[in-house]
Image (tube, rainbow, N blue to C red):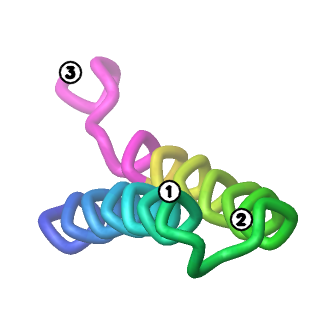
Amino acid sequence: MNHLDIALGSQGEVDVQLELAMRLGFCAKEAQQRIVERVDAIGRMLNGLIESQQPVEADWQ
């Protein structure tokens, strides 16, 4: 689980760095939008994977 949490944190860092790159003029708005869509999709996949690894109440009984 720790690796998934680290990956989710890294996804958030990429999101912030991308915003910074766009504000500083290193990345065009169109490119940023395409990349943000991919980064968001990765975040959703990671969240789904993390959620699927959580114990379910029925597993404890």
Q: Are the residues at dot 1 and dot 2 in contact (C-beta closer than 8 Å)? A: yes
Decide whether the magenta segment is chiefly helix, strand or loop. Answer: helix
Q: Is disc 3 placed on a helix, strand or loop?
A: loop
Q: Position of residue 11 (x, y in %)?
A: 41, 64
Label 3 belongs to which residue? Answer: 61
Disc 1 residue type (three-letter): Glu
What is the distance, in whole Å, between disc 1 and disc 2 at their CAs? 8 Å
N-terminal-most mark, 3 or 2? 2
Disc 3 packing (10 Å; few <14; some 14–19; many ≥20): few
Q: Is disc 2 placed on a helix, strand or loop?
A: helix
What is the distance, in whole Å, between disc 3 and disc 2 at their CAs? 47 Å
Residue at the far left in the pictured view = 2
Label 2 belongs to which residue? Answer: 32
Q: Position of residue 59 (x, y in %)?
A: 29, 32
- Relative placement, left or right, of 38 versus 54 is right
- Relative placement, left or right, of 12 versus 28 is left
On screen, residue 23 above or below 10: above
Label 1 belongs to which residue? Answer: 19
What is the distance, in whole Å, between disc 3 and disc 1 at their CAs? 46 Å
Q: Residue at x 22, y 58 (%)?
A: 5
- Write the start and end of the magenta stretch as one range: 50-61
Disc 3 residue type (three-letter): Gln
**Residue 60 vs residue 38, the one in the foreground:** 38
On screen, residue 54 above or below 20: above
N-terminal-most mark, 1 or 2? 1
The C terminus lies in quadrant: top left
Q: Residue at x 30, y 40 (%)?
A: 54
Disc 2 residue type (three-letter): Gln
